[in-house]
Amino acid sequence: MPLTSDEDIADLLRNARTIAVVGASDRPDRPSYGVMKFLQEWRYRVLPVNPQITGEHVLGEFVWRELAQIGIPIDIVDIFRRSEVAGEAVDQAIFVGAKAVWMQLGVINGEAAARAEAAGLKVVMDRCPHIEIPRLRIPKIGAEV
């Protein structure tokens, strides 16, 4: 069952430090770019993943082809992909041992969510951290509460 309570989502966001953004864009007009920038402002380490722009840099971060290339622990995999292909990113998240998958607004894939939960990952679906962080009053990493 995906996380739905404010308390569970807030705990996930408070304890995360590294967020991989699957479907990251180098175009400032795209939602994934704006969310990435916001997460960086909140002092998360944000790692963009997009095979179409691999090797480039977005907001100062190297763009990875896939999660398995990153090689450091990932707390949350934030998925900006269509619902029907979000399962690919979920499977990669399971493979690399991420702690959670976060499917963006409009991204709903119950089968992929069930696979993630069965593998021990927390799941958030059809929400956006750019909305949830201010709504839940999550402080910037390292900020006094």
Image: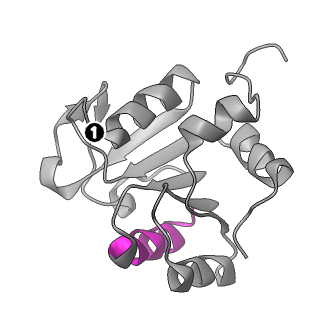
Q: Which residue is mark 1?
A: 30
Question: Which quadrant of the view contains residue 100?
Answer: bottom right
Picture coordinates of residue 25 (x, y %)? 25, 42
The residue at 40%/72% (across/down) is 83
Picture coordinates of residue 77 (x, y %)? 50, 56
Asked if residue 15 is positioned above or below residue 67 in the image, the reply reads: above
The answer to whether residue 17 is seen in the rendering is no
The residue at 31%/60% (across/down) is 66
Element carrying mark 1: loop
**Is residue 93 found inside the magenta-colored segment of the image?**
yes
Picture coordinates of residue 119 (x, y %)? 64, 80
Left or right: 66, with 89 as reference point: left
The answer to whether residue 131 is seen in the rendering is yes
Left or right: 4, with 98 as reference point: right
Closer to the camera, 71 or 77?
Answer: 77
Asked if residue 126 is positioned above or below residue 62 in the image, the reply reads: below
Q: Residues within 10 Å of mark 1 (few under 14, many from 20)?
A: few
The residue at 35%/40% (across/down) is 31
Image colouring: one colour
Picture coordinates of residue 13 (x, y %)? 69, 42
Q: Main secondary structure of the magenta part?
A: helix
Residue at the limit of the structure toward the front, as seen here: 106
What range is drawn magenta here? 85-98
Question: Which quadrant of the view contains residue 87?
Answer: bottom left
**Is residue 19 found inside the magenta-colored segment of the image?**
no
The residue at 17%/42% (across/down) is 55
Quadrant housing the C terminus: top right
Quadrant housing the N terminus: bottom right
Asked if residue 109 is positioned above or below residue 69 in the image, the reply reads: below
Q: Callout 1, which amino acid? A: Arg
